[in-house]
Amino acid sequence: MYCFFSSFNCGSAYVKTYICLVVNLALNYLFVIKYYLLFLFLLNQFTAASQYAPQVGKPGNSAIYKDSSAIKAWATKCSLKLGWQNIADTTLGKVSVGDSLSAVGKAGNGVVSLGDGGEAILTFANPIKNGPGFDFAIFENGFYTDSLAFLELAFVEVSSNGWHYVRFPAICNIDTVQQLNYFGGMDASKINNLAGKYIGLYGTPFDLEIFASLSSIDINHITHIKIIDVVGSIQNPYGNRDSNGHLINDPWPTAFPSSGFDLDAVAVIHENNETTIAEINLPGRFELFPNPLQTDELFNIISSEPITHVLITDCLGKQTPVEYTHWGSGNYTVKINLSRGIYFIKVKSQNHMITQKLYIQ
């Protein structure tokens, strides 16, 4: 560094050299302090940006208690695809704690364990819609361990038709220096958009507004929620990553019949209980008639694309696949053998779907 005292006439070379040395040291010290403060500022900004709502009992948490007046309904049906007790040792077999009934109805009535990478799909009496704030909440059975909590996490996806899903952008900033074991505690403030963030009887809430710009999903007509266990391994190829590409570190392996995410319940906060059913596909792609029809009358479908599936659901959510006959030029006939009442008929092609209310007299 240039010494601005180099041309100063002190009358003595020693004095001149000493002054230059002192000034240089002082300037270097200020230089180090400047960049140290800059580093602390950037670190503080990064830390602040990575913090989310904290655990139950701490100010600012967003948990939904099972008896909250905000809850309007609960999931009515659950289908399961169970995972392994330990995905790295499949000789142990799959999980066996709980069943599909454990995940329906109100939280606190038992759980079903999904296992490593296992899945659950929940459906409801009425679709979920986007409203002010959070729209639904998912309950797990985590518990406190000192100042942290034992948590098991899961990805969350939603669908308006039962086959096209979009995933909430999950974030997990738990460090991956060391694998969390079965007794490992987690800081909820480092977790966002992952089910299982909160301890038992307190649901993790989700806001559908995040998908408002997507045309592939109707956020006011969510019919299915898919919950996928996060394999919390920080080893490849077993580990899962969040939306930032960061490995998600949660307790693993948990090689027991109760391994993986323990699904307790799914609560509906904003329910779409309107009597009309919105079409998810482009208008005019399907024509369905007659409606109403008699119990022994044939139902007709005209479609601009080949039909792949026809399903009828009653008002209680019971689904009945039906047979259909194709007789050319996009014309189909459906034989319906149902008693009088109100039903919903769902017709799918490869790329589109329509759901329509059906009256049988």
Image (cartoon, rainbow, N blue to C red):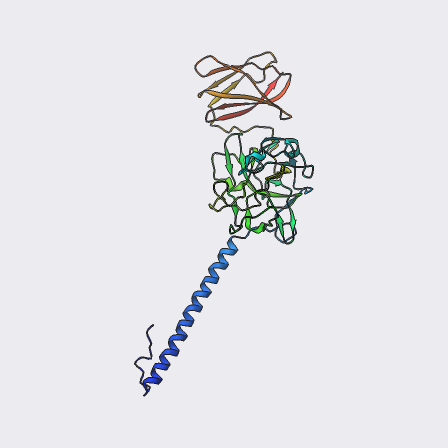
Q: Residue furthest front?
A: 91
Which of the two residues, 226 or 137, is positioned nearer the viewer here? Answer: 226
The residue at the point 33 percent across, 77 percent down is: 4
> Is 145 placed above or below 70 here?
below
| Position of the N terminus by quadrant | bottom left
Which of the two residues, 322 or 79, is positioned nearer the viewer here? Answer: 79
Q: Quadrant of residue 91?
A: top right
> Is 269 placed above or below 284 here?
below
| Position of the C terminus by quadrant | top right
Q: Residue furthest left?
A: 7
Which of the two residues, 248 or 266, is positioned nearer the viewer here? Answer: 248
Q: Quadrant of residue 7?
A: bottom left
Residue 85 visible, this angle: yes
Residue 119 visible, this angle: no
| Coordinates of residue 63 in the picture (x, y in percent) | 63, 46
Which of the two residues, 297 or 8, is positioned nearer the viewer here? Answer: 8
| Coordinates of residue 146 in the picture (x, y in percent) | 65, 53
The residue at the point 31 percent across, 79 percent down is: 6
The residue at the point 46 percent across, 65 percent down is: 37
| Coordinates of residue 8 in the picture (x, y in percent) | 32, 83
| Coordinates of residue 306 in the picture (x, y in percent) | 45, 20
Q: Is residue 168 left or right of residue 339?
A: left
